[in-house]
Amino acid sequence: MRESPEHDVIRLDPGRTAGYDVIVEPGVLARLADIAAVAAPASRYAIISDATVAGLYGATVRRQFERKGLTADLFTFPAGEASKTRSTWSALTDDLLAHGVGRDGCVVALGGGVTGDLGGFVAATYMRGVPVVQVPTSLLAMIDAAIGGKTGVDVHQGKNLVGAFHQPRVVVADPELLHTLPAADLRAGCAEAIKHGAIADARYLDWLEQNARAVLAGEVPALHALVAGSARIKAEFVAADVREAGVRTALNFGHTLGHAIEATLDYGIPHGRAVAIGMVLEAELGERLGVSHAGTAARLAGAVQTFELPTDPPGGTDPDAVLAATRLDKKARAGRVRYTLLAQPGAVARAPDGAWTHRVDDGPVRTTLGGGSAA
């Protein structure tokens, strides 16, 4: 893997949908208003941010727009996954209406994955759709949530079950913002980078392990290289399959069980940690089914552990409850749950029917979860 230059622009051309750039550059937040004015010209900008990120950057970003002669308002909501709900979506859309944001407005989603998903969903549905500029401030958002146009909210039955595809006009990722990210959140975001290497690029997976110390220490060149490397992989999958009908489902590796574990624990475990566990479990499942090469799970577990992430579900996790939660996964069809499985680190295994996901019965999954025999 190459080291990134000071400025990376990854172009994403998703078929019939207008293409857009993912800009990865230390310090680029200072140019946000200029970039937004070109990529998404609007009469009014609605900056949506959670209370924590708004306290760090909200006023600065708003003043930046105003200095350029652009009208901008800041809309906030309580930080945390618990706010990614239909009620928060409703409150935000009401606030935009009260402030006179029209169809010629633009949403600027400034924050982590929750903000990107929620702000994107507001943009997708407000006035039947207004532009959105994604400005991710967490590692997880920079390399995953902000790229690809998936927006939505959580419901009691599971994550992201109500949403829409709504591609951004531009993604502006500033690795320097990660210095305010708690160490646990930085580690959790690295789970998605590991996933990218696991499904698409074994050499990138090697690079991640070799540079884990620099990444976890918050060294900007290492973080920049990671964000740019993962953004390229994510963009390639999205461009090939905008609406997740084929190869893009490979990006769900680790997420079927990861999301189920999150739901079972009432989202008491951070998303990245759940995905780390899900990847190791799904790699074990692939080996159990004879789909993945021997040693695949150990390779994934080693990478996960290098970033100080867990490989096993928390004690007391109920395998039957996890299995029940998987049936609400968006990839499930006719009551059968489908899993992304690896052929080996760096490559996804195609199913016998040519699909990118595999239909798997509950028995082997229960055994993998430690819930008894597969019989």
Image (cartoon, grey):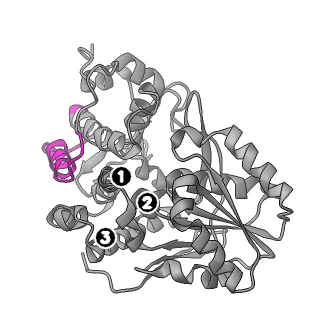
Residue for point 41% across, 51% down: 250
The magenta segment: 288-310
Cα distance between the residues tagged 2 and 1: 8 Å
Q: Nearer the viewer, residue 370 or 146?
A: 146
Cα distance between the residues tagged 3 and 2: 11 Å
Q: Amino acid at mark 3?
A: Leu
Q: Which residue is mark 3?
A: 223
Neighbor class of circle 2 (other Cα within 10 Å; few <14, some 14-19, many 20+) is many
Q: Which mark is residue 138?
A: 2
**Closer to viewer: mark 3 or mark 1:** 1
Q: Position of residue 342 (x, y in %)?
A: 29, 47
Neighbor class of circle 1 (other Cα within 10 Å; few <14, some 14-19, many 20+) is some
Question: Which secondary structure lies at badge 1?
Answer: helix
Quadrant where the image shows the C terminus? top left
Q: Earlier in the sequence, mark 3 or mark 2?
A: 2
Q: Amino acid at mark 1?
A: Asp
Q: Earlier in the sequence, mark 2 or mark 1?
A: 2
Quadrant where the image shows the N terminus? bottom left
